[in-house]
Image (cartoon, grey):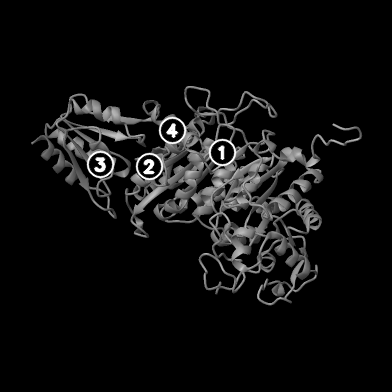
Amino acid sequence: MSAEERVLTGSHFMLGDHACAEGAMAAGCDFFAGYPITPSTEIAERLSNRLPAVGAIFVQMEDELASMAALVGASLAGARAMTATSGPGFSLMMENVGMAAMMEAPCVVVNVQRGAPSTGLPTLVGQSDMMQAKWGSHGDYEIVAYSPSSPQECFDHVIKAFNTADRWRIPVFVMADELIGHMTERVVIPPADQIPRVERKRPRHKPGDESFLPFLAEDEDLVPPIVHAGEGYRVNFDSLTHNEKGYPATFAEPHDRLVRRLVNKIRLHADQIAECEETFLDDAEVAVVAYGSTARSARQAVNEARQQGIRVGLLRLITVWPFPESKVRELSDQVKAFVVPELNLGQMSRETERFTSRPVIGVNHAGGVMMAPAPILDAIREAVR
Amino acid sequence: MSMGEIVAEGHPIDTVFRTDRLPHIWCPGCGIGPAVHAYAQAILESGIPRDRHVCASGIGCTGRAPGYLDVDSYHTTHGRAIPFAMAMALVKPELEVTVFSGDGDLFAIGGNHFIHAARRNVDINVICINNFTYGMTGGQVGPTTPLGARATTAPYGNYEPPFNLPYLAAATGAVFVARWTALHVRQLKKAILRAMQKKGFTFIEVLAPCPVGFGNPNDIGDALEEVWLYRERCVVDHRAHLPDLEIDLRHKDAPFVMGNFVDIERKPFDPLAMMKDQEE
């Protein structure tokens, strides 16, 4: 490995956590602030080597509160900023995830999930932060969350996450899990010029233009252009409810206007943001909805069921948030039931239930062990019965 | 207009303020205003272009200060202005980054960030308005409330020893440490100018009246009386023994020691320092 190269083009046998780090490198991450936590620490370790070698910044912070605050500061100075953590750190980050949403500061958080709640199972897998990813900070806001099922997707999803963050001015999560983070598999890294890059929308106004309203979203996408520190715009960024000028406006009317925009910029464009992968769904009478490491077991179960003549398909979530609700609605007209395996006691299954009147069969384990294909296969058999 | 009347179109300091945001939220007699004025004056006199000044704050009465200044301003979450500002200073080292916040914000909820930023010697300035209380929420006890002082959550008097902020800042590594009051506007401005000149972590404590939140329950009366208290009891001693800088309201003859106590050089925080050392 040549430490001076941003993009390690080629085919690698790589740890999932390292692939997250290489995704950040390839995406042009300028700034990483984090705190050691199992099972995500390998991401920080790798970036502590890789970022300084290309002149970018790695800082190990005093805690995850500071890490997330630093991300927002770095982002608003113009940097592509990322951190990596697991459940306990994710909880601490929630405070400033809200600030990132409110100030519309693009940034990326990788959560390599472990068994929870509290300190839980530091070294063992879990998928129980899915609802926290969506609702973890107080208030109404929207985020996007990806869910990699392989080290290759760790690489791919971190790049997607940076682009989505910059496109919509939101915090974006990569909701990996311990199994994927600690799995070593083939990761193919494309040439640097084939790494997709979405740039932030910048203002048409020049600094000093009195008519410039930095938080006015003039475009259909509801995303205002972003200004960075030191550019001469002298904008006020506020964690308080603010008006289009950026000034505090702590009243009902501007509050409703701002929060609706923060939410609607994602909700109204969910169909263009949401991503999923469909396998064998064309003729399916049962749909398995799965994500992360559990999707690997689900694939095995679906293959075995198909061999037994059961018409079952797999809807694998690439984005867990936005949840591909229109796809689930569409499948509801076709399938008898949904099967949702996950390493929690029913989080995305609950979300699935919101968009269908068909039975949703959860296959659940609180975490600590990989979901085996067998109980998923049992649930598929039950669903067709 | 009568002949000979002099009408000032504006004050030079107006250019540093977002005058369209006035009037401000602070109570009559509050000490934050004079301190903001000293900071604004320092921005004008710093020789650093205004577009390179950044002001960040946390939450509370003092946290509102950056919003009134016509610079890049960031009103962040409670206690987190320091790591936010650190990141900004690292990403754009050409910026002159100042955190302007209150004692509760910086030393209770944000205390951990303060000591680590000082230890690292992050190149930011921290100006702390110390009014001995949580003003915004109505006068609760805080980490700088003097022993015995009354607060809405210390009705029998504060039983916790307060922080000695200059001692804390010096011990954790700040390269410039000063304490002034809202009365010492010229000394304060000079101290801020010195902080802006210095590379590394600088700290200035500003004792400021909060007549509503702190003065009233502690029989200090109005702001003028607290300022008189400063005037009578303040002693300037740049070479003061830092452990002796505690503020004790109970002993009427105990001095409030002011001064520019620390002015040293230390390598500022640079995450790429080891790479550069290897090249050398």
Placement of A216 over or under B213, stated as above or below? above
Q: Earlier in the sequence, mark 3 or mark 2?
A: 2
Q: Earlier in the sequence, mark 2 or mark 1?
A: 1
Residue assigned mark 1: A6
Mark 3 is surrounded, within 10 Å at the Cα level, by few (under 14), some (14 to 19) or many (20 or more) other residues, namely some
2 and 1 marks on the same chain: yes
4 and 2 marks on the same chain: yes
Residue at the (58%, 52%) spot, across then down: B60
Mark 4 is surrounded, within 10 Å at the Cα level, by few (under 14), some (14 to 19) or many (20 or more) other residues, namely some
Residue assigned mark 3: A350
Amino acid type at circle 4 is Arg
The percent position of residue B262, horizontal first and vertical second, equals 76, 64
Which residue is nearer to you in this view: A86 or B79? B79
Residue contact between numbered discs 3 and 4, judged by CB atoms under 8 Å: no
Q: Earlier in the sequence, mark 4 or mark 1?
A: 1
Q: Secondary structure at mark 4?
A: helix
The dot on residue A361 is none
Which residue is nearer to you in this view: B179 or A248? A248
4 and 1 marks on the same chain: yes
3 and 1 marks on the same chain: yes
How far apart are labels 3 and 1 at the CA level? 41 Å
Mark 2 or 1: in front is 2
Mark 4 or 2: in front is 4
How far apart are labels 3 and 4 at the CA level? 24 Å
Residue, far front: B2
Mark 1 is surrounded, within 10 Å at the Cα level, by few (under 14), some (14 to 19) or many (20 or more) other residues, namely many
Placement of A86 over or under A348, stated as above or below? below
Amino acid type at circle 2 is Lys
Q: Secondary structure at mark 2?
A: helix
Residue contact between numbered discs 4 and 2, judged by CB atoms under 8 Å: no
Residue assigned mark 4: A260
